[in-house]
Image (spheres, grey):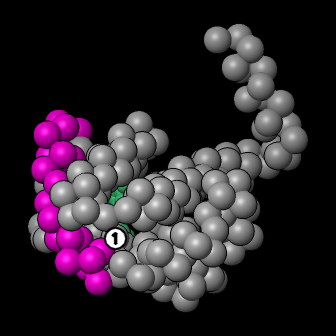
Amino acid sequence: MTIEPTAFMTKMEKRIGFTAEDKAILNAHADWGKSVASTMADHFYVYLGRDEEMDAILKEKEGRMHRLHETFIQWFYEMFTGVDNWGDKYASIRWHIGLVHVKIGIAPQHVVPAMAVVVHEVGKQLKADGKSEELQAALGRICMIDLAFIEQAYVEVSTAAVLQETGWTEKLFRRLIATGANSM
Ligand code: HEM
């Protein structure tokens, strides 16, 4: 493991401005979150299924779609409960989700638009159910934290793999990346 999930979580909370008030409002709406989770999962997988590459990934393994529907519902609900008040357990679950996606080869280009769909669909649902802007803002922030975990996992795993394979130092690797970016 290259990052420490709890430290990363703390850093993201600060960077994104995810506050105690956000946590309280999410907790207070956990039942609502549970009640809409399945509908959100439907929107999510209809969206993924419309993309040729992502549809192929979804259909690659028997029973995957069904499993995903269930894991999405749980993931969605956990944004409201915070699992252990957004502590060690929450961070480690989010880091693990990131690793799962890296292993399957799901890149940032897939994950970022997918999270945008979640934010968009949940926004419509909040409006339809007359929920507050504060709740919408809190949900937006926790979605961005969860997204940061998945994206960071991609970078961490790629970097660790190159360093392990080549024996390069991290400093050298970063210099090569900067040089590479300069020449593009
Ligand atoms: C908003 C972004 C996303 C969220 C929140 C999300 C959520 C999750 C969760 C919670 C899991 C279960 C992880 C575990 O086993 O611990 C999972 C697995 C998986 N996700 Fe995602 N996902 C996202 C984006 C995507 C995208 C863009 C794809 C592209 C097809 C995808 C395909 C998969 C696949 C194939 C698995 C493994 C399923 C299996 O065989 O068990 N996900 N995802």
Quick check: which quadrant has ligand 1?
Answer: bottom left
Residue 76 rendering spot, x and y as whole percentages:
34, 70
In this rendering, the answer to whether 135 lies above or below 6 is above
Name the residue type under label 1.
Phe
Q: Residue 65: which quarter of the image?
A: bottom left
**Can you see residue 58?**
no
* Dot 1 beta carbon under 8 Å from ligand 1: yes
Q: Badge 1, how many Cα within 10 Å: few under 14, some, many 20+?
A: many
Q: Is residue 2 left or right of residue 73?
A: right
Magenta run includes residue 33: yes
Residue pointed to by mark 1: 76
Residue 27 rendering spot, x and y as whole percentages:
45, 82
| Quarter of the rendering occupied by the C terminus | top right
Q: Which of 46 and 16 is in front in this view?
A: 16
Q: Is residue 121 left or right of residue 77?
A: left
Residue at the image position 47 percent from the left and 56 percent from the top: 137
Q: In this view, does 87 lie to the left or right of 68?
A: right
Residue 82 rendering spot, x and y as whole percentages:
49, 80
